[in-house]
Amino acid sequence: QVKLVESGGGLVQPGGSLRLSCAASGIIFSSYNLDWYRQAPGKQREPVAGITSGGSTNYADSVKGRFTISRDNTEKMVYLQMNSLKAEDTAFYYCNANVPRIGRSYWGQGTQVTVSS
């Protein structure tokens, strides 16, 4: 059974930092691309950051220079370090594990991030 479990969300003041974690089980973790998405109230889910099975990373323009994605294949974990947080970063953040060439895509249940003073 595939399971992705996010943690690390919470309430933080503007300019603060949070580190999101996503623990995976039931997949050959090292073979999967890993992505973080977010969905704000009334908006569509959008990609935030991704890291391929080979370790290449990509970021949405809105978070470049502030967020860093990383993975630990031994622990089957993916992380999102979020610095210099802004109110517009407030959203539910989701972890996704995928292998597009075989049509596999799995989602976690998400974790809430709220940036507010």
Image: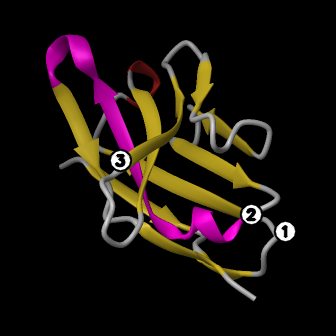
Asked if marks 1 and 2 touch (Cβ < 8 Å), the reply is yes
Element type at marker 1? Answer: loop
Question: In the rendered structure, does residue 110 fall within the stretch colored magenta?
Answer: no
Give amino acid for label 3: Ser
User: For mark 3, does the 10 Å Cα neighbourhood hold few (<14), some (14 to 19), or many (20 or more) residues?
Assistant: some
Whether residue 91 appears in magenta in the rendering, the answer is yes
Q: Which mark is residue 25?
A: 3
Magenta range: 86-103
Q: Earlier in the sequence, mark 3 or mark 1?
A: 1
Q: Which residue is mark 2?
A: 85
Question: Residue 108, how many percent across, how many down?
Answer: 32, 56
Where disc 2 sits, the SS reads loop
Q: Is residue 63 above or below residue 85?
A: above
Mark 1 sits on what residue?
15
Determine the residue positioned at 63% across, 43% down: 62
- Residue lying at 72% horizontally and 55% vertically, measured from the top left: 82
Closer to the eye: label 3 or 1: 1
Task: Name the residue rendered at 56%, 31% in the picture.
Answer: 73
